[in-house]
Amino acid sequence: MFSFSFNLKFVRYALANVTYVISFLMFITLLVSIYFKDGHSYVYIRQIIIMLIASFLLKFGLKREEVIKLRTPDLFLTTSLMWVYGVFICMFPYIIIANYDFANAFFEMCSGLTTTGASIITDFKSLPISLLFWRQITQWFGGIGFIVVGVLILPNLGTGGMKLFKTESSDSEEKAFSHYRDMAFAIAVYYLFITFSCAFSYWLCGMGKMDAIMYSFTTVSTGGFAPTDDSFGELVTTYWPGVVFMYLSALPFQVFVLNLRNRSPWRIFKDQQIQVYTLILMVVAFLISIDRLLYHTGSELGSQYHYSLFYIYWESLVNLINLSTNTGFGISDYSAWGAASIGLMATMAMLGGCSGSTAGGLKIFRLNIIQMFIHQQMNKTIHSNASSVIFYNGQSVDKDDLQGVFFFICIYFMTASFAVFILSFTGLSIDQSLSSVVTTISNTGALVVGGVSDTTGGFDGQTNLQKVINGFVMLLGRLECTTMLVLLMPKFWRY
């Protein structure tokens, strides 16, 4: 017997706010359409009106005290619905303007909002600039959306060891609600600041104003979708600031916000997650450089540096940052670097960046906690009576935290394996299925381990069913699997 005792008024409140924000983003897109006179302004005007009416109806009659009374199941349900709802209301411009069917529009919008960056678009010149801008700005919105979810919501769900990153320990609902709004606002301001800084840097390096804005959206959100047919690596003068902002966007935003607010910016670099992530990048880039030297693979970014160890290391680091942050820009043809290098790149793509960033993947802190746990157990094999406590960023990691980390890793790889199994049944080879899942569940977008279709090699060559499946895998990966999978349990609906 289902009880359905959820706070549906909070669900309405959350969906109404999402609708308001998307309406505002579409208004900006409308201005782009009017400025460039691409002839599609009426599409955006019509949908803005519909969304404003929908958001008004969703919020009609709601009272503040009814909204803040929440339980954990309400957060699970609301978080999942917000992302699925966002995909559906954002995909209409593709259907109306580009004449995409449901599967293509769904895949493209899932890729956008989850900042995966994979695309079925092959001819960018055939699409109006307003639609390309819509792809970029929704991807940017998905980036900040996940930061807010990762910092304020996922830690309160108690899954994946994320409660180590809780920013509010008060039991007062009123105080917590106010704190969450303040933190979300501070993160939004910081996100806007680095987006503006990235766009300004691109412009200083020679990009046109519109290209600089669009590339900054996809760089800061670590989405990696380039709005042109040109490879990002060919823009030699502009990939330098791009790499810096990819790296910054893969670091925990709440660390920057809290330390800047407390006027202690140097403490940012004492964060354990940032230290470990930076060290791993440097070491793995060195291993890739050694492998490339052994296999005599030259540099792609500058032919005059083919035999320069420093330049090979720099190029390896640039591409590693590109993939480990799950940005996935086309910088170099790393498929020619040898099996070991490709394996390391794919591993880093699955691992991802830091918790509380726009990057996807398993997250660095989980790898770090597992490493410390293994070290603890190795010590116990030598000194059986030794009792040691694992500390992460000054906090003790208790049994529940460890169980959360191991649970997430298990569910992550089980979900990936099941997705590979399902895609294989749709006609893809095992290699294509594996490549699809690595690309989508880690929200990387780049085809690190091979093609995903027989015809074109990309997602545009897949069937509609395969595209829809991959779209849902992107959503699962973005919301760390458990948030959506728990909705499939009958017990959840009897809570």
Image (cartoon, rainbow, N blue to C red):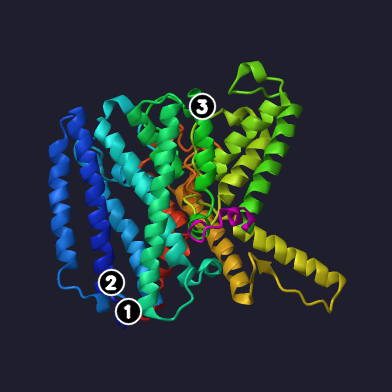
Q: Which label sits on residue 69?
A: 1
Q: Position of residue 110 (x, y in %)?
A: 36, 48
Q: Are marks 2 and 1 in contact (CB under 8 Å)?
A: yes
Label 3 neighbour load within 10 Å: few <14, some 14-19, many 20+ = some
Q: CA distance from mark 2 to mark 1?
A: 8 Å
Q: Which residue is mark 2?
A: 10
Q: Position of residue 144 (x, y in %)?
A: 40, 52
The dot on residue 233 is 3
Q: Quadrant of the C terminus?
A: bottom left
Indicate whether residue 267 is drawn in magenta. Answer: yes
- What amino acid does circle 3 point to? Gly
Q: Is residue 108 magenta?
A: no
Q: Earlier in the sequence, mark 2 or mark 3?
A: 2
Type of the residue with mark 1: Lys
The number of callouts visible is 3
Indicate the position of residue 300 as horizontal and vertical percent values. 59, 23
Residue 400: image quadrant is bottom right
Which SS class for mark 3?
Answer: helix
Decide which of tag 2 and tag 1 comes sooner along the chain: 2
* Circles 2, 3 touching at the beta carbon (< 8 Å): no
Q: Residues within 10 Å of mark 1 (few under 14, many from 20)?
A: some
Q: Can residue 283 be seen from the camera position used here?
A: yes
